[in-house]
Amino acid sequence: MLTVSEAAALLRSFDRVLILTHIRPDGDTVGCAAGLCAALRTMGKTAYLLPNPGLTENTAPYFTPYSAPADFVPEKVVSTDIATVGLFPDNAKSYADKVDLAIDHHPSFEGFGKANIVRPEAAACGELILDIVRELTPLTPEIALPLYVAISTDTGGFIYSNVTAATHRAAALTTAPSTSCSSRRNPACGCSWRPPCWQRQNFMTATGQRCCPSPGRCWKNSTPRRAMRRTSPL
């Protein structure tokens, strides 16, 4: 099994990456894949997610911007939050013996990749992806938001018994403003995301996406909160 540093080094050597998610995709597999894809693109690499037919209206907004075109031919394949090839969607089964790096947190992980990293003590795979990504590139809102979704959904909103102090620290890192965020209000943006109502911070990327024009508004109707409805037991 690889260490975090070894996994990061391997990803630095990759390009034209296709990232796989599991059947009945939940917030953890989608958030991990989207966050990792955003990080790889920040590094100047070509990266996409293999389309997953099981997406719901809650998970699709995080997935769709990174969905691979039909003619994309990958050089490297990475899986996120998948314990066994038996959980591959039908359109991913041809990659069962072609996964160059498998990243997971399940104790039942079968180590099916050419290289593997697993953290069974993690409450969410998002915790592990976050540590790997932080060795690759500074966090941006595009990277941090899906990783927060990954961690918050797989912990049931931080209420499951496997939640640890490390889980909360990871979540805090994904909600802290990055160097590419602005503290200015941007009422014209019209984005759907709000940070937790107790966190009076504004977020805006350089392109005006995913800002928080109403920092005092509770996030109970925001997209990440809706995504916390678990769609599968995976």
Image (cartoon, rainbow, N blue to C red):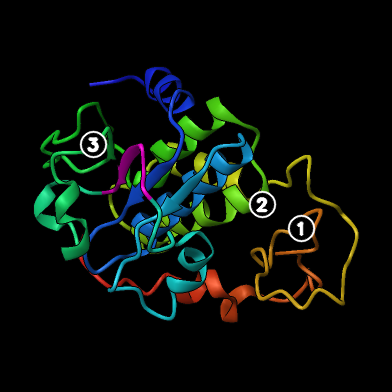
Q: Helix, strand, or loop for circle 3?
A: loop
Q: Is residue 92 magenta?
A: no
Q: Using the image, tell me which numbered label, if any, was put on residue 203.
A: 1
Q: Residue at x 36, y 48 (%)?
A: 73
User: Which of the 4 image quadrants contains residue 138?
Assistant: top right
Q: Is residue 155 visible?
A: no
Q: Residue at x 51, y 34 (%)?
A: 133
Amino acid type, mark 3: Pro
Q: Quarter holding the C terminus? A: bottom left
Which residue in the protein does label 3 denote?
Answer: 120
Q: Is residue 212 left or right of residue 120?
A: right
Do labels 1 and 2 touch, CB within 8 Å?
yes
Q: Quarter holding the N terminus? A: top left
Q: Is residue 77 magenta?
A: yes
Amino acid type, mark 1: Phe
Q: Nearer the viewer, mark 2 or mark 3?
A: 2
Q: Is residue 110 left or right of residue 34?
A: left
Q: Helix, strand, or loop for circle 1?
A: loop
Q: Earlier in the sequence, mark 1 or mark 3?
A: 3
Q: Local crowd at mark 2 within 10 Å, few (<14), some, or many (≥20)?
A: many
Q: Nearer the viewer, residue 221 or 45?
A: 45
176 shown above or below 138: below
What is the x, y in percent for residue 132?
A: 46, 31
Q: Nearer the viewer, residue 156 or 191?
A: 191
Q: Which residues are magenta?
A: 73-81
Q: Nearer the viewer, residue 129 or 107?
A: 129
